Image (cartoon, rainbow, N blue to C red):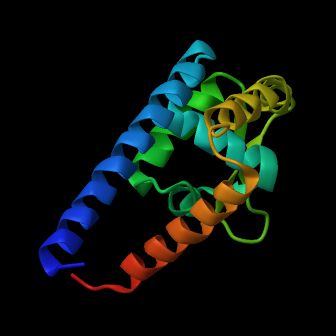
Amino acid sequence: MSPNNDIKQSLKLYIVLSRANKAINEVTNQFFQQNGLNPTEFAVLELLYHKGRQPLQKIGSKILLASGSITYVVDKLEKRGLIKRVSCPTDRRVTYAEITEEGAAFMEKIFPEHEKNLHELMSALTPEEKETAIELLKKLGLSIKDLSY
């Protein structure tokens, strides 16, 4: 393949990835909104639901969000009774976010539907194609992380 065609192929890959990501996000964001959440609120709840209590300072990096936004999101979820703040007994500088019983019940209700929706969105691919896509996208992401700009 000529260098020019190789560059065009990279641009096409970027466009295809962007459009696929946009299509998936539109559907999932609509689901979150129907359940009274935005994507960030869902991400925080999902993290706490599956991983348990987390230090507030670490949540942002785990869900790819700026740390300044975490306080706002945690405040909103706490007001709704879905999560609570818990002080660390051994270090006053650390505060944890923890899902409440109400939050866990809420996630037990909506998470299976979220999983089902994602499965339907990905159903155009066979299990083998999904595995190949996972491997290739992981390879791409890790290679970009190693580049310095």
> In the image, 133: left or right of 5?
right
Image quadrant for the N terminus?
A: bottom left
Badge count: 0
71 vs 115: above or below: below
Residue 10 to residue 41: above or below = below
Between 75 and 47, which is closer to the camera in this rendering? 47
Can the viewer see residue 52?
no
Residue 138: x and y in percent read 55, 70
Residue 148 sits in which quadrant? bottom left
Of residues 126 and 15, the one drawn nearer to the viewer in this rendering: 126
Image location (x, y in percent) of residue 127: 75, 53
Q: Check the image and name the residue furthest to the top.
A: 34
Rendering coords of residue 90 (x, y %):
77, 71
Q: Residue 57: horizontal and vertical position, in percent?
A: 55, 62
- The quarter of the rendered structure image containing the C terminus is bottom left
Q: On the rendered structure, is 108 left or right of 140?
A: right
Please give the name of the residue rendered at 42% of the width and 81% of the height, measured from the top-left corner.
143
- Who's the residue at 73% across and 47% down the image? 48
